[in-house]
Amino acid sequence: MAFTPATTEQRFVLDHVVRIGEIAATERYAAASDDVVDAVLEGVGQLASGEWAPLNRTGDTVGAKWTPDGVVMPDGFAQAYKDYVEGGWGGIGVEEEWGGQGLPFAIQTAVLDTLGSANMGFALCPTLTVGAIEALQHHGSPEQQALYLPHLATGEWTGTMNLTEPQAGSDVGALRATATPLGDGKWSIKGTKIYISFGDHDMAPNIVHLVLARTPGAPAGTKGISLFLVPKFRLQEDGTPGEFNDVRVVSIEHKMGLHASPTCVLSFGDNDDCIGELIGAELGGIRAMFTMMNNARLNVGLQGVQVAEGATQGAVAYALDRVQSARAGSPNKDSVKIVEHPDVRRMLMRMKAQTQAARALVYYAAGQVDRANLGDCAARNRLELVTPLAKAHGTDLGNEVASLGIQVHGGMGYVEETGAAQYFRDARITPIYEGTNGIQAADLVGRKLGLDNGGAFATLIADIRAEAKDERLLALVDACEAIGRKLATADADDKLAASYPFLTMLSVATCGWLMERQGGVAGTDDFGRMKAAAVRFYLDQIVPEAMGLNAAANASAAVLYSIEPELFAA
Amino acid sequence: MAFTPATTEQRFVLDHVVRIGEIAATERYAAASDDVVDAVLEGVGQLASGEWAPLNRTGDTVGAKWTPDGVVMPDGFAQAYKDYVEGGWGGIGVEEEWGGQGLPFAIQTAVLDTLGSANMGFALCPTLTVGAIEALQHHGSPEQQALYLPHLATGEWTGTMNLTEPQAGSDVGALRATATPLGDGKWSIKGTKIYISFGDHDMAPNIVHLVLARTPGAPAGTKGISLFLVPKFRLQEDGTPGEFNDVRVVSIEHKMGLHASPTCVLSFGDNDDCIGELIGAELGGIRAMFTMMNNARLNVGLQGVQVAEGATQGAVAYALDRVQSARAGSPNKDSVKIVEHPDVRRMLMRMKAQTQAARALVYYAAGQVDRANLGDCAARNRLELVTPLAKAHGTDLGNEVASLGIQVHGGMGYVEETGAAQYFRDARITPIYEGTNGIQAADLVGRKLGLDNGGAFATLIADIRAEAKDERLLALVDACEAIGRKLATADADDKLAASYPFLTMLSVATCGWLMERQGGVAGTDDFGRMKAAAVRFYLDQIVPEAMGLNAAANASAAVLYSIEPELFAA
């Protein structure tokens, strides 16, 4: 299926949701002029539709393969990646000091949106590199920055995040990998990490692993964790990759989807010859990890947008082509394109509206990254508050839209050839990795509601209320405010039992606000009319639907703990 | 993962939802004594857990394979099928006249529930045979019945349903397969059918295809369709399979899931040597098809129950075993089983509640089949009304629960080895085949609301209202009644635009009624306490959630048609 970059929509969201003009008016982001933004969106759209999208199905059917010499990507990926590097796409959001283009995070978000809509599994590679860059920019020493950042900024080298171990999934503090000082400022790294996306591949001459490990005598839990930089190949005197650094790919996972992305089990120091460098302070790993993870969470929320965009384009194309049955109630008994049938239209409209909502939410959060970088403390708080929403609700919507995409295709959606099934399979990991959506909900009620003594939450509510006009949206906002206040003082079990429905309600309220705003400025051209219809559908149907979660978000944990755990098996 | 038959739950639902005692009190179903029912549930549970469940993963990973000589099933399936036939499980619901056991359809439902919870793809084979048996029982000639039913009743021969053609999916009337009279009462069949589940396999010496085709001069559309019996091997004088009947398996589909079930493209009469017999009257095909399809729809709704049961068992077992993180708010900092975490419990409780709700709805509908067979006209109407609910909502719940099952497993859910992903992939076809869920919703608002001049709908509402006590449930019933009245006179587009959310609301109201009833009679043993908790969760959270669809179910089609179809691609 042909992929069309959502350039008009992206530009519209950048203008009216991110308000990129305000960001570009600052000295730091002056490079983000209208012309440059347009050129970036156009350019990456060409790369995505011309080179990345045609590899989407190969990525799924052939997939990354483990070999004793490392992971081999399907044919075509190395070249498409090379063109990405040479086009300068890796450095969009990286500071100019390191060879990047210094554009706002929101623009980098749009670039990754386009690449991932074309080929989500492939785009995970640049996404992870961006995480490594951010960790080094914030926590690396000047030497580390000078040696590694220029190569990461171009995408010439790629990056990974190594958190998870078999016994330490969501509970990062339980990890056991060790780092032992070698006396020369370097460390010997030992341990096994699992679920390492693009932990190995054959598209780059080096891979920079950021690895969480424990130093000798470190306290238990997250306080005892340090972050290490562990290259696949150690750097030589001239800074080029040299000797193999004893990082072995044990296997790759047999996953339901996202086959283009090799999910590796990495073994560090099997031969006691894996050398790492500390990033930031010893025992400061969890802080550095959160730097890396927070934006990574937005980028996973963005994967929800990507898969929703791809699935919607596929379903719309199918519904505009497939002829089946006459329209009910019509005197004309000729079969029509299925887009003419009301329930198919309802599904397509929902797909459009939810895709737009997800994009608005994630881009909005991305804009807060830029504002926070500009020193805006309110934006920093806003970012903290909306990050779990963007990650969890963005990925939930990606899954919902991908499922509707199959349904629009009917039986054809269940056979692999149409690609609808791939979106559905690819999407399903996104509510899990980078902190499960349940953990996002726990983060929302456990940390974010209390941020700034509740000020961050109160300000979001006030901002929505100040701008929103739709009555149902305002009712949802009222409900969110009441629940937020109640949960702030609830006990842990009650708070967590209500967290997920509350997260959904607050996400829909935020999306409703941003959608209504877009509806207010939509023009009368084709794009504007589609936008207006999607906004109206969102406010008319999706906002009231979220109010249905009010009971669950107000429920206590009592019913959940009314039985012993073993009774679930009764 | 070990599969445990849900015998206690099934018995409880048969007693309190189906009220099997009333049915067994009739002469026709006197065989369904308490002892017999218990023995059936126990016996099929042993077959399912001992032989069918261990093949579930093989069915997925190896799958049915196409060869030039026909479809080959994975190792072990032929033997497991033989044991099913020899155990007498095929004939549970077939009239004794044909060698069956003459038990109620509700009992057969429980049997298929257990087999499909163990191995959904495999259980589709008996499910389809049951459809063929019903068509022949109702529409076959005495000769056809005598020749075929005894072999189908045991399951020795299997059956298929051949409706779909490439250009005729949901629009059955568009089919083009032809039947030409041969002069001896037989017909020459020619055409290609797609999506034929178990259209070929190597577990039975003959396969009985029921094929919709057009006779010469037949009118266009569904009125011109006749139903034909087309065996894979023609019967010899002695009734045993003889000559090959020119039914060729062209290919099998490469599906996202349900790999144990070969989905065939069948070509009839490539060599002009495919002979069929008319079933029922010429041009009476659509009526015969509906006989076959209506109960097939219940059996697909039952697949939602099956997949929900399997996925829930898997997730519960994992959550009772996997240790991760301390419980939030607890002074004890030791890691606990994840079932102790509130959001995991919420997911498990939801899985239990939705599985129970789906089972109640589908078994309830199955009980109406028996009551209708006993001549109860009200039950016949009730069956008609709840069939689209059971099919659509049952399968929607199967999908929801399978997705939660992955989420409970975290990253392990996305790798194929745990089996959680298989449930998710297997489930996704069920909202599509046997009439998409959108078509079920159209059937509800287009035909069923008006049944008996609205009496069928009004009676369901009255029955629920007479028994229900929960206020939120009563509010949902009121809302359903109001929407139903409004839709009865709405124009076609508005009716269809609101059909899906309305179907969900009415389904939840019906499930809420049946769940509340069960909660009222649940005992104080482990099973009863789990039941009571699930019922409370259902009424407290899921019923109010459905009220959130009220706006969508009251919306007109205006917003959907406010744009030209091409704008969906804008």
Image (cartoon, coloured by chain):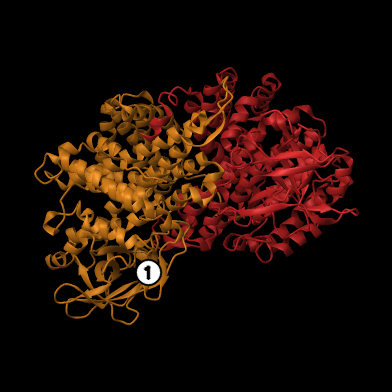
Chain colours: A red, B orange
Question: As drawn, which residue projects farthest toward the right?
Answer: A238
Task: Assess disc 1: are there few (<14), some (14-19) or many (≥20) residues with their C-alpha within 10 Å of its C-alpha.
Answer: many
Query: Is residue A220 among what the camera can see?
Result: yes
Quadrant in the rendering for residue B139? bottom left
Quadrant in the rendering for residue B490? top left
Q: Nearer the viewer, residue A51 or A130?
A: A130
Residue A398 percent coordinates (x, y) = 57, 46
Residue B37 percent coordinates (x, y) = 19, 42
At 21% from the left edge and 41% from the top edge, which residue is drawn? Answer: B38
Q: Nearer the viewer, residue B292 or B531?
A: B531
At 31% from the left edge and 78% from the top edge, which residue is drawn? Answer: B246
Residue A320 percent coordinates (x, y) = 53, 60
A429 relative to B6 in the view: left or right: right
At 54% from the left edge and 46% from the top edge, which residue is drawn? Answer: A399
Type of amino acid at the residue the image marks with label 1: Val
Question: As drawn, which residue projects farthest toward the bottom?
Answer: B271
Image quarter where the C terminus of chain A lies is top left
Q: How many marks?
A: 1
Image quarter where the N terminus of chain A lies is bottom right
Q: Nearer the viewer, residue A54 or A354?
A: A54
Residue behind mark 1 = B71
Question: As drawn, which residue projects farthest toward the top?
Answer: A489
Q: Is residue B163 above or below residue A89?
A: below
Q: Is residue A370 above or below residue B278?
A: above
Residue A556 percent coordinates (x, y) = 48, 22
Q: Is residue B43 above or below residue A464?
A: below
**Which element type, helix, strand or loop, lies under badge 1?**
strand
Q: Nearer the viewer, residue B493 or A475?
A: A475
Query: Is residue B567 among what the camera can see?
Result: no
A202 relative to B399 in the view: left or right: right
Q: Chain of mark 1?
A: B
